[in-house]
Image: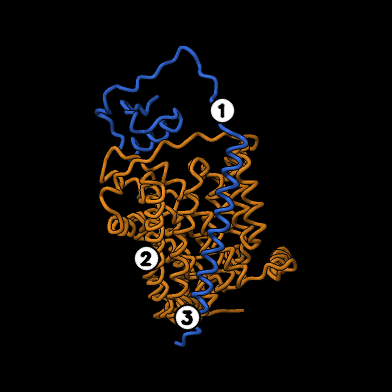
Chain colours: A orange, B blue
């Protein structure tokens, strides 16, 4: 085949991305730059927003074949890890390896604060239905209130995959804004006297209990809500790596290299789903607003329940630790410490707030399990399991 | 929007919150049982070492108040004392 200079030039120019650039691509490239600015310039959850922003940028370059829907493209394969619910549980494995359940075990009552903060999930569910979303979509949006990115992605990919991109972006954006969203609500709902309450020193916990907890919690929770097993099972396995004392290499890998690698894959995959036709919709704006309501209501729910526990315990519990019942670990606990020490610099709430904080991780996973029980398929012959096998077969059979 | 459409999410919310509390309350009592059955035992105290809990507060350190708070809380947990009883006097990152 012979090409003249003019034909060759015309062919090369015709295949550049400029010829396929639409206004939708342009807007999404601006959105990706905003995400990159928030990550780099403002340091808002940079470990996640940076790869999400860059994935979005790649996906919106015409002819790049980098969108999650471009079958055969690189990020299409990364996205299969989200679609078939592989990557979020692996993140939970790393989170479990990083988490010390000691403060929770020393004061197990704080688990109730982790439960109370889930009120944000359900008020948002009602709000989402009111705004016209169906129950599955509303559940996926509501879980943003759990302040847990992997859980939000897990539920969105299961119940409303078409809303995955805006839900993931809203969840991670608001998680990074916890230090701005929570303090005004905490101050508004508590008195200066309540904020000054000093809590008793936590009792030490035996290593036997720390080893037994992940095993027993897995059995109890997963028998009651089988749908939660991928998330909670991996969380507890990671924690067992940490506490057993016999798997130092697995523990170290889970809390460092594995979680970092999976974070890159997960965030790029989420970014690759942010195409103009999936993101530039009125629903995205509604989800952003609902996400803010979810976080605010979760914080309020935790603080109000903290006030109730304060009254019941005769003033032994500082209500500020209730706000840490949203799972954003450890940022929410640090916010409790900050607001408490603003009122009394000698008040140390950090370790007390870590109890409800890790309880929030369990609480949001349980909330997710309830949604899966209600709207997902948890039967033995799950089509998801079959499709996961199909996906693997499809990938390995590629040339 | 009709009442039935809003009643369903409300019902789901009430049931789901109840289930969350039931699951986590079961976990609370399970933890209490485990702590009761396997209580913490004080490790043997090494002899010949002493700490000085009443020295002056951190002076001239570059450590932020958050780091001092975290170290104090961790020390309190380790020593079995309230963080209010402890005072971090010096943080030397070189050792």
Q: Determine which quarter of the picture holds residue A243.
A: top right
Cα–Cα span, label 1 and label 3: 54 Å
Q: Nearer the viewer, mark 1 or mark 2?
A: 1
- Observer-nearest residue: A44 or A171? A171
Discs 3 and 2 share one subunit: no
Which element is circle 1 on?
loop
Q: Which mark is residue A6?
A: none
* Parent chain of label 1: B
Can residue A399 be seen in the rendering of this structure? Answer: no
Q: Earlier in the sequence, mark 1 or mark 3?
A: 3
Quarter holding the C terminus of chain A is: bottom right
The residue carrying mark 2 is: A33
| Other-residue count near label 3 (Cα within 10 Å), few / some / many at <14 / 14–19 / ≥20 | some
- Image height of A240 relative to B94, above or below: below
Residue with the most extreme top position:
B48
Cα–Cα span, label 3 and label 2: 39 Å
Cα–Cα span, label 1 and label 2: 55 Å
- Observer-nearest residue: A2 or A355? A355
The residue carrying mark 1 is: B41
Which element is circle 2 on?
helix
| Other-residue count near label 2 (Cα within 10 Å), few / some / many at <14 / 14–19 / ≥20 | some
- Image height of A310 relative to A133, above or below: above
At 63% from the left and 41% from the top, the residue drawn is: A212
In the visual, does A390 lie left or right of B69?
A: right
- Image height of A282 relative to B38, above or below: below
Confirm or deny contact between disc 3 and disc 2 (CB under 8 A).
Answer: no
In the visual, does A223 lie left or right of A267?
A: right
Residue B82 picture location, percent across and down: 38, 32
Residue A391 picture location, percent across and down: 69, 67
Residue A398 picture location, percent across and down: 71, 66
The residue carrying mark 3 is: B6
- Observer-nearest residue: A49 or A67? A49
């Amino acid at each position: 085949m012979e090409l003249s200079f003019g034909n060759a030039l015309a062919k090369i120019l015709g295949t550049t991305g400029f010829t396929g650039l639409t206004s939708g691509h342009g807007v999404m490239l601006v959105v990706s730059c905003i995400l990159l600015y928030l990550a780099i310039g403002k340091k808002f959850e940079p470990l996640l927003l940076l790869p999400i922003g860059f994935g979005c940028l790649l996906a919106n370059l015409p002819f790049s074949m980098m969108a999650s829907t471009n079958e055969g493209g690189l990020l299409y394969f990364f996205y299969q890890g989200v679609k078939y619910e592989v990557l979020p549980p692996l993140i939970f494995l790393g989170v479990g390896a990083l988490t010390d359940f000691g403060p929770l075990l020393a004061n197990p009552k704080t688990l109730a604060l982790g439960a109370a903060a889930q009120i944000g999930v359900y008020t948002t569910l009602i709000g989402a239905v009111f705004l016209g979303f169906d129950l599955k979509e509303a559940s996926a949006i509501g879980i943003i209130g759990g302040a847990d990115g992997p859980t939000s992605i897990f539920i969105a990919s299961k119940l409303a995959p078409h809303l995955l991109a805006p839900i993931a972006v809203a969840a991670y954006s608001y998680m990074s804004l916890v230090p701005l969203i929570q303090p005004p609500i905490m101050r508004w709902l508590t008195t200066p006297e309540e904020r000054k309450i000093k809590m008793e020193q936590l009792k030490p916990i035996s290593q036997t209990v720390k080893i037994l907890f992940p095993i027993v919690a897995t059995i109890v929770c997963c028998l009651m809500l089988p749908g939660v097993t991928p998330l909670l099972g991996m969380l507890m396995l990671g924690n067992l790596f940490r506490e057993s004392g016999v798997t130092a290499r697995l523990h170290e890998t889970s809390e460092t290299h594995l979680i970092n690698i999976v974070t890159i894959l997960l965030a790029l995959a989420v970014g690759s789903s942010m195409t103009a036709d999936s993101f530039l919709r009125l629903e995205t704006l509604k989800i952003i607003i609902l996400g803010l309501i979810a976080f605010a209501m979760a914080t309020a729910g935790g603080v109000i329940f903290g006030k109730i526990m304060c009254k019941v315990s005769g003033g032994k519990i500082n209500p500020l630790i209730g706000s840490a019942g949203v799972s954003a670990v450890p940022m929410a606990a640090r916010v409790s410490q900050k607001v408490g020490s603003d009122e009394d610099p000698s008040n140390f709430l950090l370790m007390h707030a870590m109890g409800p904080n890790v309880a929030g991780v369990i609480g949001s996973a349980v909330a997710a399990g309830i949604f899966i029980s209600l709207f997902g398929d948890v039967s033995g012959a799950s089509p998801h399991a079959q499709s996961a096998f199909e996906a693997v077969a499809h990938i390995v059979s590629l040339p | 929007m009709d009442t039935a459409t809003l009643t369903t999410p409300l019902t789901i919310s009430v049931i789901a919150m109840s289930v969350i509390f039931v699951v986590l309350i079961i976990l609370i009592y399970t933890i209490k049982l485990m702590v009761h059955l396997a209580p913490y035992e004080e490790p043997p105290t090494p002899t010949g070492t002493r700490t000085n809990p009443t020295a002056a507060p951190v002076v001239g350190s570059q450590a932020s108040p958050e780091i001092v708070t975290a170290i104090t809380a961790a020390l309190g947990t380790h020593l079995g004392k309230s963080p209010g009883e402890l005072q971090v006097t010096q943080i030397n990152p070189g050792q």
